[in-house]
Amino acid sequence: MKQIKILSVLLMISFGLNLNAQKKLNPVVEKIQNETNSASQLEKLAGELLDEIGPRLVGSSQMEDSHNWAVATFKNWGIPAYNEAFGTWKAWERGISHIDMISPYVKSLDAMQLAWSPATKKPITAEVIALPLFNSEAEFKSWLPKVKGKIVLMSQKQNYGRSDYQYKEFGTEETYKKITEEKKNESDAWKKSIELTGYNNNSLPLLLEENGAVAVAISNWTGIMGSNRIFGAKTKNIPMIDIANEEYNQLYRLAENGKAPKLSIDVKSKFNGTAKVYNTIAEIKGKEKPNEYVILSAHIDSWDGGQGATDNGTGVITVMEAARLLKKFYPDNKRTILVCLWGSEEQGLNGSRAFVEDHPEIVQNTQAVFNFDSGTGRITRINGGGFEKSYDFLSRWLNAVPNNITKEIETTYPGWPSSGGSDHASFLSHGIPAFMMGSLNWGYFGYTWHTQRDTYDKIVFDDLKFNTILAASLVYMASEEPDMVNREKRIMPLNEEGKPGEWPEPRKAERSSDYYFVK
C-alpha cells in the first residue's frame, strides 16, 4: 500500500511538471523572449516619452515632440518612419496653475486649469458661489444674476468622499446600504436639477461666463480618493479649472453655509493658432508579400492632467519595443509590418479613422491589427472581433506564444466587433480583423484613466514585458501565415427589436477642431 501511495505521488508530481513545462518555442519567439527578459528597453522608452516629453495633448508642442521622438527612435533602430498629417487642431500650451483659497484662511489647492482653458491676464481674486439644486427653470433663471463677479462651483458636492470599496469593507452593512442609497439619491437629484436648467455640463459654463462669472470650477471626481479626470474647458474667455474633490467639497460647504470663501486664480497658458495633427507610421517592409500588412496599433496622444502614462504611454512603448525586437530577430519578415501611433484618439479615434480613409490600399490588404490601449496590466483577454473563423487563426498564433503568457489569456470566439472605444474599431468597421488587447485592471478606470495621477510610477514593467513578447509573437505569426485569414463575419446577436444586429459602420474622421469647441 505504501509503495502504491509513493507511486501515486510521483505520478502527480510528474503530471504537474508536464503541465508547467515550457513548450519548445519557435527560434524567433525564443529570441524575442530572451531579449525582453535580459535587455528590455521599455524603461528607457518610458523615461524619454513620459519624463522628458510629458503629456501629449493634441495640438500642443509636446504632441509634436512625441511624434518626432518616435520617428527618430525608429530610425535609430533601422526602421524607416515618418509623420503623416491628417488635419489641424487648436494649438494650446499649458502654463502654471496657482489656485489658492485666501478666505476663510490661506491654503494652496490641489487644482489645475483644464485643457484649452483661457488664461488669466492677472490673478483673479473673487468670492466663490456654489450652484445649488433647482426645482424649476424659473428658479434657475432667478438665481443666474448672482454669478456676476463670482467664481462658480459647477459640480455636485460629494457628501461622502471615500471610495465605495472602503464603505463596503469597513462599514457596517447598514452604513454601506444607507450611504449607497444616499449617494444615488443625491446624484439623481443633481442630474434632475441640471436638466431643469435647460443646459448641460458642456453648455452651462459658457452661460455662466455670459452672465458675468469670472471663472468656473468643477471637480470631475473618479470616486477614488485623490483622482480627478482632467478634460477640456468649455469657456471662451474666462478660466475653467478642476479642484480636487476633498478641497472642492470644503469650498462648496463654506459657500452654501454663507461663509463666502474666496479664491485667487492665476493660470498661465496660451493659444498658438492651429497646429497640424499627425499619425506616426513605422514600416518594416515585407520580403515575400510586401503589399500585405500586419499592424501594431497604439495612440500616442493623451490628456494632460498627468503624464499620459497608462493611457497610452504603456501601449506606445510596448508596440515600439515589439518593433525593435522584430527588426532584430525577424529579418526575413514575410509581410510588411506597420507600427501606427495614432494622433487625436482621445477626441474620437480621429487618427486611425483618417488612416483608413486615406489608405484603402493598405486596409484592404491588412492581415491583422493588434491594438494596445488598456493600461499597464498584462494581457488577459482577447476576443475574436466578430470573425467567424477567428478561433482558427488566433488559436494557432497564440499557441506559438510562451505558456507563461498564454495561460492567463481568456479568448472569446467569435467575439463581437467594437464600434468605438479605441483604434481597432476603425479597422473593424471596414471588416478587417482587428483585436483589442484587454489587460488586467490595476485600478485603471478609477485611478489613472484620464486623471492627474496617470504618471510614470503607475507603470508595471514586468507586465509590459509579457505584453511585448505577446505583441511581437503575434505579429510574427500573422506575418508568417501562408494565406490571408478568413474574414467571414459572424451573425450578429438579436437587438432589442428581435432583429439581427448590424456590423458597425465606418465613421468619418474629424480633421479639424472646429467641431469640438463650444461655438
Image (cartoon, helix red, strand yellow):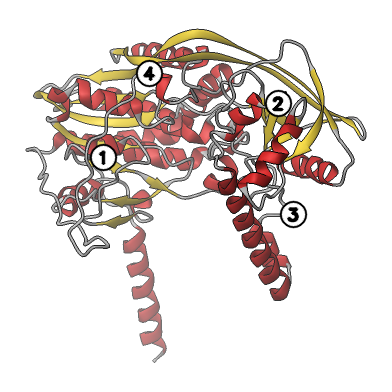
Q: Which residue sits furthest right?
A: 105
Residue 271: x and y, percent?
A: 56, 11
Q: Earlier in the sequence, mark 3 or mark 4?
A: 3
Residue that carries the numbered disc 4 in the rendered image: 512
Residue 120 appears left or right of 68: right
Q: Label 2 is placed on what type of residue?
A: Ala
Residue in the image at 56% along x and 26% along y: 304
Residue that carries the numbered disc 2 in the rendered image: 215
Residue 246 appears left or right of 442: right
The label on residue 474 is: 1
Residue that carries the numbered disc 3 in the rendered image: 159
Q: Label 1 is placed on what type of residue?
A: Leu
Residue 39 appears left or right of 211: left
Q: Secondary structure at mark 1?
A: helix
Q: Label 4 is placed on what type of residue?
A: Ser
Residue 347 sits in which quadrant?
A: top left
Q: Secondary structure at mark 2?
A: strand
